[in-house]
Image: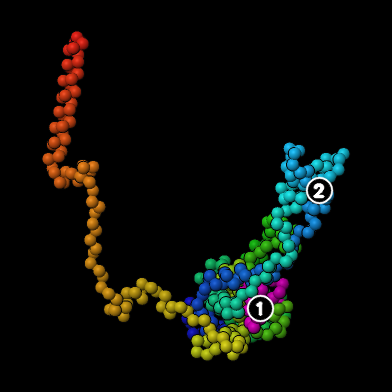
Amino acid sequence: MSCRPLVTVFSDEGQPGNPTKLPAVFKAPIRSDLVQFVHTNIRKNKRQPYAVSSRAGHQTSAESWGTGRAVARIPRVRGGGTHRSGQAAFGNMCRAGRMFAPTKTWRRWHRKVNVNQRRYAICSAVAATGLPALVMARGHRIDNIGEVPLVVSNSIEKLSKTKEAVKLLKALNAYADVEKSKASRKLRPGKGKMRNRRFVQRKGPLIIYNEDHGITRAFRNLPGVDLLKVDCLNLLLLAPGGHLGRFCVWSQGAFEKLDALYGTWRKKSTLKKDYGLPRPKMIQTDLSRLINSDEIQKVIRPIKPKAKHFSQKKNPLKNLNVMLRLNPYTKSFRRNQLLLERRRRKEKAELLEKKRGLKKD
């Protein structure tokens, strides 16, 4: 997790200025499992209800013919003189029949998520934006930027023209991520093309501001760029698809307001009622270093002596190796028995040939 005490504030010309204190939320534990759970559930809350017509598949007069006519008892269309008459109807296996379990508009579309879980997920998502490894793993182009997290002076909030926004991003060496998003625009596969979502493209930078003095108008037309007010942080934009590490550009006012929003481990939030920053379960996450430390090694029990392993007792009458260990003469005895048996067979064969009058060549 990010542990730097100070973060550089860049001017709108890309020049480094006075540093500011790193908010405590950037040291919060990163729980990818919780982020994915919360993202999956709150993403369902924008769905629109859909259903097939309640009359679909039942807009015909059909009745079963009953038994005794050597046909299935499925309802059949009445009448005659046409191919349709006598055809099976209503069933989900029938042509022009209804679907199985027709969809209804009163399905449970929305999901409630605990407030504390949502806040924990946002804290984790914000903390992940301060780790360059996670941001690069999402595919953002941040090779040439000055620092992560990237904080810009409050003059960014007064921009009102798109050309000014482009000039700012180029001065911060962050415009490569916008170009990456623009080059990724392509047709959506599937039927979404016909449903007002014809194109898909990658996500670009997320601009987080404190007060809107024209910043939303300046950045809204750039491909892949999203804007968020710091008071209304949204997990769907902080971790798109439930994947941590969105590239964020913070205004100084928004960055410094995070401590008041989410609090620190010393004091609770001043803008949320009785809310404190979540603490990590483990302060020291290096398990091998933890287990091998002198403090733990001197209180644990010593290593037990090597346990004796007893082999399974085997029957010497069925297992030749065990019998040889008990009685080495067994090998010679069995060999003599085999030779004796072979000699007896030979004598018996010679006796039979003599009685039959056969002579060997």
**Disc 2 packing (10 Å; few <14; some 14–19; many ≥20):** some
| Residue 237 visible to the viewer | no
Q: Amino acid at mark 2?
A: Ala
Q: Residue furthest front?
A: 68
Q: Amino acid at mark 1?
A: Leu
Q: Is residue 264 above or below residue 360?
A: below
Q: Residue at 76% of width from left, 50% of height from top?
A: 90
**Disc 1 packing (10 Å; few <14; some 14–19; many ≥20):** some
Distance CA(mark 1)–CA(mark 2): 58 Å
42, 327: nearer the viewer: 327
Kindly state the secondary structure of the residue where label 1 is placed. strand
From which residue to which does the magenta span run? 218-237
Label ID, residue 323: none
| Residue marked by disc 2 | 62
| Residue 4 visible to the viewer | yes
Q: Is residue 83 above or below residue 218?
A: above
Image quadrant of residue 229? Answer: bottom right
User: Tag 2 or tag 1, which sits nearer the N-term?
Assistant: 2
* Quarter of the image where the C terminus is located: top left
Q: Residue furthest right?
A: 81
Whole-percent x and y of residue 30?
Answer: 51, 75
| Residue marked by disc 1 | 228
Say if the magenta span includes residue 331: no
